[in-house]
Image (tube, grey):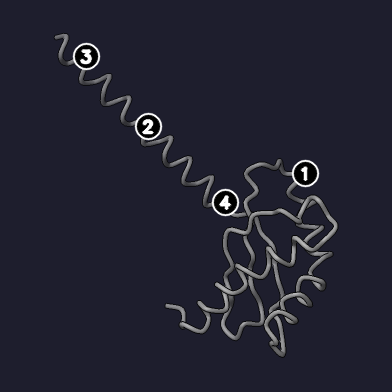
Amino acid sequence: MKSINLQRTESLLMELIPQALSSLNNSNINSLAITGVNCKKGKYDAVVYFDGSDFDNKETKEIINSLNKANGRIKSEVLSATGWYKCPNFKFEVDTSLEKSKHIEDLFAKIKNNKKDITVESDEE
């Protein structure tokens, strides 16, 4: 269970990171959808998740590379907006939970179709 302060920090970063990204001149990342922030205890490190469903593996690597290059600028923007003494180090990762939930939905659809097929076959007998 996360502390309330840690949850507040994550929530604030969820607002501030997209603002910081929008101020950058890189069209690949300035409108990137941030889907989550996971701060570690002590707030020294934070994993920032983004929606990568529209990108292939090569594009995703380029985006992560661009985000890592802009890390210092993003941290500066967050620090100036919050007045914090120190900003977490950001690590950027693709959010795969959207893909997983879509895969699960597809599986449920297949199961539903299989049940219908079985029901139709048993009714015909």
Find disc 1 in the rendering and name its residue: 58
Find disc 4 in the rendering and name its residue: 96
Quadrant (top left, top right, bottom left, bottom right) of the C terminus = top left
Say which amino acid is labelled 4.
Answer: Thr
- In this rendering, would 5 be left or right of 53? left
Say which amino acid is labelled 2.
Answer: Ala
- In this rendering, would 80 be left or right of 121? right
Q: Are marks 2 and 1 in contact (CB under 8 Å)?
A: no
Q: Residues within 10 Å of mark 2 (few under 14, many from 20)?
A: few
Quadrant (top left, top right, bottom left, bottom right) of the N terminus = bottom left
Q: Are marks 4 and 3 in contact (CB under 8 Å)?
A: no
Q: Earlier in the sequence, mark 4 or mark 2?
A: 4
Find disc 2 in the rendering and name its residue: 109
Name the residue at 75% across, 60% down: 22
| Vertical relation: 75 (above or below) 98 | below
Q: Earlier in the sequence, mark 2 or mark 3?
A: 2
Find disc 3 in the rendering and name its residue: 121
- In this rendering, would 70 be left or right of 100? right
